[in-house]
Image (cartoon, grey):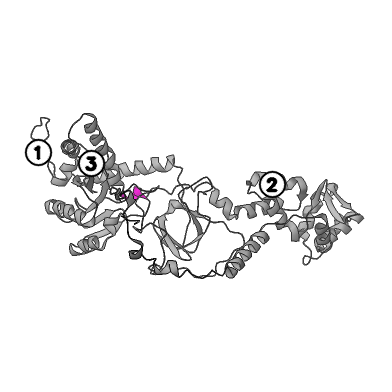
Amino acid sequence: MYTKGSDNPSDFLSRHPCQETDNKHEMSAEQYVNFLTMHAVPKAMTIQEIQEATKHDKTLQLLTEIIRKQAWGSIKDLPTTGEDVSELNLFAKVRDELTINEQLGIILRGTRIIMPCSLRERAIRLAHEGHQGLAKTKQLIREKIWFPRIDKDVETLIRGCIPCQANGTANHPAPLKMTELPPKPWHTVHVDFCGPFPTGEYTLVVIDAYSRFPEVEIVKSTSATSTISKLERIFATHGLPNILKSDNGPPFQSNEFKQFMTENGIKHQRITPLWPKANSEAENFMKPMEKAIRAAHIEKKNWRKELYHFLLNYRATPHTTTKFAPAELLFNREINTKLPSKIINQNTKIDQQVRANDEKGKRNMKRNADKSANAKEVDIKVGDTVLVRQTKKNKWSTRFDPKPYCVTRVKGTMITATRPGHYITRNISFFKKVLQQEIQHNSEDASDEEDYSKLDNNLPDTNIEENNELAERRYPARDTRPINRYGQNIYNA
């Protein structure tokens, strides 16, 4: 909309621009960073440096005299202190290959230079430039130089290289930790959302850990208020559970949901972030439920109605682990379906058989899963330095975050680690123990009561992400469009 110039004066800031920024401190900081970068890169090594280092290396000077006089038998007469007698014994094993370049004052093994002790680590770092693997680095360094225990020193340095560890393969997955069967039906329930569906709706799934009996509610919002409303209806039917397990979604982290749990005396257990396997009962139920909904869509049927048909049959079908129907375990009776059935005497003493079947099924599941995944116990304890697996954003992204964390809490397979400024909690499979070379940690181990309230947990606004690889949104995104009047965006007018 047109506005007369006299009625549209310039704002204060456009008439009073800020003074020019002094870049002196910014330049100093940039120069300091460049200085550190340049000095962190190993410099090329010259023959003159090797010559000078050889002159000051007592072991190599003694070796030079032994080679000239061929007095190899005198090594055993040397005192055990001072020169490295064990290293001279290693040189003695290759005595036939050792020669002295009198012009340069260096020792050779064949065509390879014997490296003085003071330059060995630098030589290994030069060979490891570009971060080739262990075998390639050994192959390169053996072409030019040699010294006793060269393979061991190369392995020690490369295995302690943080960039190489961050780009390395993941650890073997930890063995499955099976949960015990609850003492009674509806003692422990698992809660999770499924969706959104194309209609913008979700399904709230509540499943009993003992009987595997599912309750499903169709909701239009995943807010805490909507979730609590549906849970109240379910609990009014089956009673209040003792324990409720959920993921770390926004509704389950709200103060409103926390108050709801407290008022009803329910213990709320949230699973390890980015580890949906810990909520496996609810996650496993999602697969057949989603299949039934997709099948209804293909058949042009009302998916909400077909969902209830699916639930009827699912609740009446014996579970693969317990060998009993979920409804039979929860209600202690069989429920009628569209299939004919005869009246039989119900056996109420089936708890022992259920437990035996459950233990056998979980034992087989653990054995097969651990064998298939080649699972190994991971020895991570409080105080260890670890790397954390990160989401790959581009081709430069490493498998692990190269900035190490320090483990401050270990609770089963749930690990909490910190670094300056923030902390992170993940399953043990997300961590990789750092093999560091001659690095000492003087900081004391943090106790289980450590306060993380002032640290950033490196997660999105919901504090803890929903899934393992970046969860899908649980609510539809609002599509905002500019409002134009007379060809001009009114928000920019």
**212 over 88 or under it: above or below:** above
Crowd tier of the residue under label 3, counting other residues whose Cα lies within 10 Å: few below 14, some 14–19, many 20 or above: few
**In this picture, which residue range is highlighted in magenta?**
274-279
Q: In this figure, which residue is indicated by the disc labeled 2?
A: 138
Q: Front-most of 432 and 42? A: 42
Q: Is residue 276 magenta?
A: yes
The quadrant of the picture occupied by the N terminus is bottom left
- Between 14 and 181, the one lying in front of the other is 14
Residue for point 24% across, 42% down: 322
Does dot 1 land on a helix, a strand or a loop? loop
Amino acid type at circle 1 is Asn
Q: Which numbered disc covers residue 199?
A: 3
Disc 2/disc 3 C-alpha distance (Å): 60 Å
Figure quadrant of residue 295: top left
Q: Neighbour class for label 1 at 10 Å: few (<14), some, many (≥20)?
A: few
Tag 3 secondary structure = loop
- The numbered mark, 2 or 3, whose residue comes first in the sequence reads 2
Inspect the image, locate mark 3, and give the three-letter code of the amino acid beneath it: Thr
At 20% across and 40% down in the image, what residue appears?
Answer: 324
Residue 315 placed where, x, y %?
A: 18, 40
Alpha carbon separation for disc pair 3 and 1 = 45 Å
Q: Is residue 367 above or below residue 65?
A: above
